[in-house]
Amino acid sequence: MAIRINDFMCGMFAAIDIRLVDFKLEFGRIWDGDYSRVILADEISPDGCRLWDMTTGEKLDKDRFRRDLGGEEDAYQEVARRLGVLQDDGPSEVFDINHHRKLRGKK
């Protein structure tokens, strides 16, 4: 399962010119009747990944904080913009699906 997640994430980030250097995963187990299933039970964010710009090598992850480089918020927002979850012309916050559903009259 980890290899499949790695392949997917490497491709997803490469498509937006970000190199996925490494990442951490946490798995959980849920019961489905008499059988248990292993699931990915972790967030995927710059906090749990090392993400570098493919052209410049700029760090776009928590290393900005660890190495006292500054600009963590800008780097995280850049990742979100490239992934399409943060709009350039809108508010500077990550898309909130629950807020969007309320505006559309859905629960």
Image (cartoon, rainbow, N blue to C red):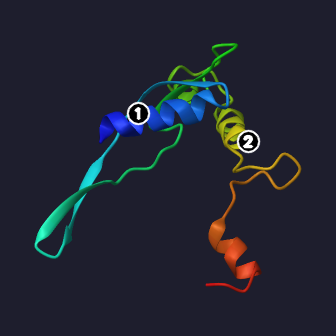
Q: Amino acid at mark 2?
A: Arg
Rendering coords of residue 44 (x, y %): 48, 45
Residue at horizontal 69 percent and vertical 13 percent from the top = 56
Question: Outermost residue, left direction?
Answer: 34
In this view, the residue in front, 61 or 82, is 82
Residue at horizontal 43 percent and vertical 32 percent from the top = 7
Rendering coords of residue 4 (x, y %): 37, 38
The earlier-in-sequence mark between 1 and 2 is: 1
Q: Secondary structure at mark 1?
A: helix
Mark seen at residue 81: 2
The residues tagged by marks 1 and 2 sit, at their Cα atoms, a distance apart of 21 Å
Question: Outermost residue, right direction?
Answer: 89
Rendering coords of residue 87 (x, y %): 80, 50
Tell me, yes or no, whether the two marked residues, 1 and 2, touch with CB atoms within 8 Å. no
Mark seen at residue 53: none
Q: Amino acid at mark 1?
A: Asn
User: Can you say whether 73 is above or below 91 in the image?
Assistant: above
Residue 39 figure quarter = bottom left
Left or right of residue 65: residue 7: left
Q: Secondary structure at mark 2?
A: helix
For mark 1, what is the residue? 6
Residue depth check, mark 1 versus mark 2: number of the one nearer the observer: 1
The N terminus lies in quadrant? top left
Residue at horizontal 69 percent and vertical 30 percent from the top = 71
